[in-house]
Image (spheres, rainbow, N blue to C red):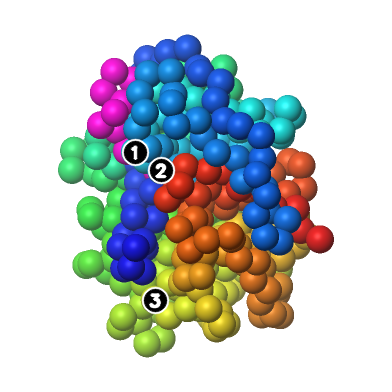
Amino acid sequence: MNVERAVRILTAAALLAIAGCAHGEPAATGSGPSAAPNGIELFALNPQRHDDDEDRWPGGIAKGPDGALWFTELNGGAIGRIATSPLGQVKEWRIHARAIDARPGSIALGKDGALWFTINNFHEIGRITTAGAITEYSAGEDIHPAGIAAGADGALWFTSPTSHLIGRITTAGKLTHYTVPTAAAFPQSITAGPDGALWFTERAGKIGRITRTGTITEFAVHPPKGRTLFGITAGPDGALWFTEPNDKSIGRITTTGTITEYAVPQGYPTSIALGPDGALWFTSLVPSAVNRIDTKGTVAQYPLATSFDKPGGIVAGSDGALWFTIYSSDKIARFLPH
């Protein structure tokens, strides 16, 4: 798989779209962990699910209020849950009757204790409770939701790359849209900032900030031409940290807009999250690895066993470990920092 295709797949897998309405009985799947280099544990999703044998392509992942990790299945049309106790037990819920055509991508924990996710191809935002009850909301005509995050205002905020806008949906389903000033912004990932605003990456080479009232400010990463910004998360230092896959860099932006970049020796960094050790952790495609960068810019890399194992979304679990999806081989990975 070449890097361009891998990045496109990850962009779809970790950030696409929604849904939910009816839900079926969950099936317990998965297996015990297998070992990979660097102490990484791999949990394979059962290839023979209760209703089909499709590849899953797990993409986005979030920590649930129940201590488990919740993830989307881009190709499986489902939401999955992997437990920390008993370790590795997996359950999956089909989104609805059309689930095989659904493409759930990004997922986030809402202030209401439910998990919220995007479904790009159905123009929807979905909500799933920890009991597996799914509800779906329209994101609007011609809207293709991608990244999603909970705001300090209790609403869910999402990006729509092809519509160049940021959306806001309340837990009651009320929808508002805000157009990004840059004409071809292609907003990607989004996260809550320490200043109460939402911060998002743009494929146009900019970082955006949107207040709870919808005022948008953009900060260009110089030179912006050719830059592709992807993942973003709040750091332990009051700044936002983001990935630059094409430039093999990790960026840092303060809430006043000062940007610093750190080169990654190898990588194509994609998703990024704050780790339990106070460092930033990110996944990369070439080589396939989970990586650590501290606030001084020092990078450490922990490769996976094979180049075929392409990591996707990443999040810190309640068990003190890093959890990330491996979309290319239908696995969930767990890594406990030393």
Q: Position of residue 327 (x, y in %)?
A: 44, 48
Q: Quarter of the image for the N terminus: give it.
A: bottom left
Q: Residue at the location (71% across, 33% down)? A: 87
Q: Position of residue 7 (x, y in %)?
A: 36, 63
Residue at the disc numbered 3: 246
Callout 1–callout 2 Cβ contact below 8 Å: yes
Q: Residue at the location (18% across, 38% down)? A: 141
Q: Distance between the residues labelled 1 and 3?
A: 25 Å
Q: How far apart are marks 2 and 3 (CA)?
A: 22 Å
Residue at the disc numbered 1: 75
Number of the front mark, 1 or 3: 1
Bounds of the magenta span? 96-105
Foreground pick, 239 / 301 = 301
Verify whether residue 99 appears in magenta.
Answer: yes
Up the image or down, 24 lies above or below 171; here it is: above
Specify whether 316 is left or right of 248: right
- Rendered image quadrant of residue 185: bottom left
**Dot 1: element:** loop
- Residue 240 showing in the rendered view: no
Task: Please state which amino acid type lies under the numbered disc 2.
Answer: Trp
For label 3, count other residues whose C-alpha is less than 10 Å away and answer few (under 14), some (14-19) or many (20+).
Answer: some
Q: Quarter of the image for the C terminus: give it.
A: bottom right
Task: Please state which amino acid type lies under the numbered disc 1.
Answer: Asn
Q: Position of residue 156 (x, y in %)?
A: 46, 40
- Residue 331 showing in the rendered view: yes
Q: Which of marks 1 and 2 is nearer the N terminus?
A: 2
Residue at the disc numbered 2: 57
Foreground pick, 282 / 236 = 282
Task: Please state which amino acid type lies under the numbered disc 3.
Answer: Asn
